[in-house]
Amino acid sequence: MCGIVGAMAQRQVQNILLEGLKRLEYRGYDSAGMAILDDQATLNRTRAMGKVAALEDKLLESALSGHAGIAHTRWATHGRPSEHNAHPHQSGDKLAVVHNGIIENFEAIKESLEGEGYVFTSETDTEVIAHLLAREFDKTGDLLEAVQNIVSGLDGAYALGVIHADQPDTLIGARKGSPLVVGVGIEEAFLASDPLALLQVTDRFIYLQEGDVVRLRHQGNIQVFDHAGEQVSREITKFEHGDGAASKGNYRHFMLKEIHEQASVIAATLEGRLSDHHVFPRCFGADADDMLSHVKNIQIVACGTSYHAGLVARYWIEKLAGIPTQVEVASEYRYREVVVPEGTLFVTLSQSGETADTLAALRYAASKGGYLASLAICNVPGSSLVRESDLCLMTHAGPEIGVASTKAFTSQLISMMLLTLALRNVKQGDDDVQADIVKALRALPGLFEKGLAMDGAIEKLSAAFAEKHHALFLGRGPMFPIALEGALKLKEISYIHAEAYPAGELKHGPLALVDADMPVIAVAPNDELLEKLKSNLQEVRARGGELFVFADEHVSFKEDDHVHVMRLPAVDEHVAPLLYTLPLQLLSYHVAVLKGTDVDQPRNLAKSVTVE
Ligand code: G6P
């Protein structure tokens, strides 16, 4: 969380930094700030509480001039959102630093610095970095050396951008545990937490590795040093998604745009990975064929929406590939003693590839040993998760900006179905089941386009939710995780308390909550559990509950004033979880719009959670 951006350019950098912050706002948006060295090498700083727009207003009144600067948008971890806790943080009037991450030993460092007379003006962990750097700079007179000397004393995670008035030709970046890329321009260079922040100035990037420190100087001079201080050469990668992803186009919100992109995202995630009968195992890596044939167990680890994709996958893998599968949230997995059954494939799911808990779980699994291999299903090439895993499958959702994940989830489900089919194939070769599912996958983009026709009807339906305080989502089998995801979406962006239950569990507690004020949403595709689900819904009706059912167009469902049925195109039951996600996304979107919440940047949340 938190986004950082830095620039060392021939031109004025204020607006480059400001645009970068706007594009990074999905990473945090409770305060923002910027520091720039002017032509007399004086350090000037502006900070504002609230969104980047508040900082922009201040800069309109009084601009920051200069060619070297750093900026930050914050998601509070240490210290409440306020102007004095906003970054950049300074030590004296010459050194400024922006930081994304958490310094776990900051209290001990702070105590010792206070003992030396340093005065702290914020409650953040970051301010210790500013003072450590200023102290080290006084000794060495060189900002690169100062950064290299202090980082080993920082426990935790950081991505840093640092400038100093006595070396106005230098901008230093460093990363460990938090993402940082270098944007390579023509005779100029940039830093950012995410390439998206810099697409207005370059499409060429260096993805810094763990422990790297980078020095940017005028004329686009870039030097990277590894954790041992050795100068190293890092590959320059061209960003392939174009800049369209960073704009809303004709949509009111990024979330709505991303919901609408799902048909093409599915097609992109399938592209080149399927024959008419099966999945090409090579899409998981050159030697994946052999590795997959040795898989006897699967452990899936992820957070948030990605975790829900893992839960759906368990139903698929156990049913279609017959392989025992466990799914766990990363923050739990990483801190418990785990037993690793023989032949376990360790699978992480992550949109960003930088989620701190998921990364830590992968590292924990690697340190424990005993796993057959690790496989990352991820949307960001070059991310830490991808680099540290043995194998990876990219999800091709394109950049996702809305904090509530939509198209990334769909692409994760597609990827997990590809894995399921590949595992089935290595066991038993081609069969009709795989050929049928391949066909169903290929038909999905068309069904998503059709499904979007429900948008208007769902918008009308949303009025029934806007005044409610609670909602209950029900599903059975692989539709239970889809219900979980529906409830998560509603919570995240409309702030309505929502829970999801496997419908069969209703009678063991949640039925006590059901009354006219508790809307109950059910996802009811035409599958083997449909009749059982219908009985569960009768239990709701008998208690006076208001039912909203998303059902297959060919299934009969009795409607009345309190049972509202929305029809979806008929879909193969194996891929139904994908299609039934769509109306739940649209529902939460429209409820949030009606409630007037900040759809793309809901309160208290951030898209990329790079802190524990
Ligand atoms: C945050 C986001 C969620 C996301 C989760 C995991 O909580 O708000 O939308 O599902 O992190 O992120 P990842 O990048 O690992 O999928």
Image: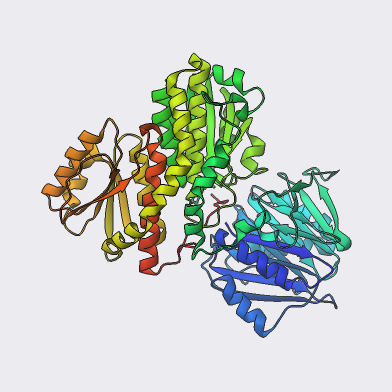
Does residue 240 sit above or below 283 in this rendering? Answer: below
Query: Is residue 332 at least partly visible in the picture?
Result: no
Q: Residue 272 in the image: x percent, y percent?
A: 61, 33
Residue 284 sits in quarter: top right
Query: Is residue 413 at least partly visible in the picture?
Result: yes
Viewed as shown, does residue 46 lie left or right of 418?
Answer: right
Does residue 107 sit above or below 411 in this rendering? Answer: below
Residue 307 sits in quarter: top left
**Picture residue at 83% right of the left edge, 62% below the top:** 188
Quadrant where the N terminus lies? bottom right
Viewed as shown, does residue 62 lie left or right of 332?
Answer: right
Q: Nearer the viewer, residue 274 or 113?
A: 274
Residue extending farthest to the left is: 542
Color theme of the render? rainbow
Q: Residue 266 in the image: x percent, y percent?
A: 52, 42
Does residue 322 sit above or below 475 in this rendering? Answer: above
Q: Residue 322 in the image: x percent, y percent?
A: 42, 20
**Picture residue at 82% right of the left edge, 58% below the top:** 216
Q: Which of 581 and 312 is in front in this view?
A: 581
